[in-house]
Amino acid sequence: MKKLLSILRLTLPCMLLAAPSALAADSGAAQIDTGDTAWVLISAALVFIMTPGLGFFYGGMVRSKNVLTTIMQSFFIVAMISVEWIILGYAMTFGTDISGFIGSLDKVGLAGVGSSILENGTIPELAFVAFQCMFAVITPALITGAFAERVKFQAFAIFILLWAIFIYNPMAHWVWGGGFLAKLGALDFAGGLVIHILSGVSGLTLCLLLGKRHGLGKIPMLPHNLPMTVLGATLLWFGWFGFNAGSALGANALAANAFVTSQAAAAAATVSWVLIEWISNGKPTVLGAASGCIAGLVAITPAAGFVAPMPAIIIGAVGGVICYYSVALLKTKLGYDDSLDAFGIHGIGGTWGAVATGLWATTEVNPAGANGLFYGETHLLFAQIVSIFVAYALAIFGSFILFKIVNSFTSMRADKSEEVTGLDITEHGERGYNQAIMSGSPFEDTLSAPLNTSTINDIGMNNHNL
């Protein structure tokens, strides 16, 4: 016993001296930060609420006979794409890069993900899986605004699933998963290229392929419930803080910057849209305010973690004006039926945001980014423009091919009688309301009713949903 005590007495000081160096060596290994993990999981929940919120935003803008099918499209996408993401989507997007084109299938079914820490990160990889899942969910839901009130549910579900696999997953890999656009130097903090351009341009392609709604221009097709739309816009604005600030993947200064720039752009676009609408039409509308805030959030999404707050105000204000004119003039002049302005807000707003990132991005905000044109460098703007063209090409040609495939074995377009009856009844056997609350008003949408433009203007509804 005396010998044991003597040995311990001699070795204990050595052990105490060695402990700090051992701890230092261990601290060099990847560690989970509980604060960062909590923020990313909360952000994932915030982004989740955006898709049901989008259902309300779109649902209030359609006619009452189509409110349930519009909400159902967003709600069902939450479930269907979540399953696809876990089984296949995450592997295709964030699996080991194959020649800059697609992720390998080494993470199919989230194989090997459960106990791992995100590479070069401070959160469990599963937290990143959850966060990115919500991005994969909301992107195809945005498309539904372009073809609202005229697509059969079965064809819709098949098309959206194929679109997520063959269009969203590759584009997300090209930009975020180490693909060729990331190697080119393109920056997309939270989805201007991947989410808004891709969904908006795909929506435009589909609405052109499907054709106009029956009676468009002959009968009023006005929002049936604007309070519902404002509720949806509020949920989207609320969730967007997780969308943008959560993309910092940590509770840090970059997240704070993205939070502030998101609010700045949304507020500026709301003001600019309302002002330009007020000047143009003589009345500021609540639908215009709701649309403006979404336009600003779309515009700042790719730039939120790369630009300072003052440029964010400019990006938002310009985005509000550009999107307003895209909705009020471009759609009317070209004559396409983008029912709820998915292209006018998301396609155009996302394009402007991607360009603006190439103008105002600065490494003073994010050292991992790059300097844009206004900070003395041109390569980023070049990379952004190339990426925009790639996103447009993929959305147009990919959506066209998938439409032709799906339409070859099941009709995507509802027929005239189904549209007149309403898709709530013909597709789901349900009504959103117990009785025709709009009966006898200018909102009643029978094909025999002429379009009374003066009545529409008198009630202050001369907006973009005609």
Image (tube, rainbow, N blue to C red):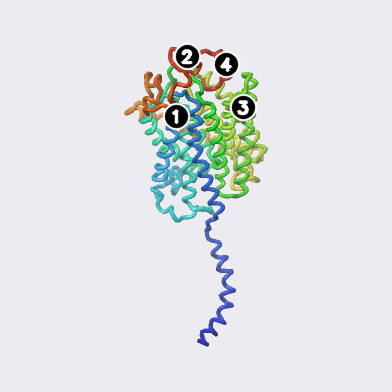
Residue that protrudes farthest toward the left in the picture: 409
Whole-number angstrom distance, CA of label 1 to CA of label 4: 26 Å
Q: Which mark lies nearer to you, 3 or 4?
A: 4
Check disc 2 and give the amino acid type. Lys
Callouts 3 and 2 close, C-beta under 8 Å = no
Check disc 3 and give the amino acid type. Trp
Q: Which mark lies nearer to you, 3 or 1?
A: 1
Check disc 4 and give the amino acid type. Asn
Residue that protrudes farthest toward the front in the picture: 434
The answer to which of marks 3 and 2 sits earlier in the sequence is 2
**Element marked by disc 1:** helix
Image location (x, y in percent) of residue 371: 63, 42
Whole-number angstrom distance, CA of label 4 to CA of label 2: 15 Å
Residue 186 in view (yes/no):
no
Whole-number angstrom distance, CA of label 3 to CA of label 1: 25 Å
Q: Disc 2 designates what residue? A: 218
**Element marked by disc 2:** loop
Image location (x, y in percent) of residue 301: 57, 38
Q: Disc 3 designates what residue? A: 273
Residue nearest the viewer, comparing 22 with 341: 341
* Above or below, 454 relative to 85: above
Callouts 1 and 4 close, C-beta under 8 Å = no
Residue nearest the viewer, comparing 238 with 14: 238
Q: Disc 1 designates what residue? A: 70
* Above or below, 395 relative to 4: above
Horizontal relation, residue 415 to residue 201: left or right: left
Rendering quarter of residue 408: top left
Q: Disc 4 designates what residue? A: 457
Image location (x, y in percent) of residue 38: 54, 50
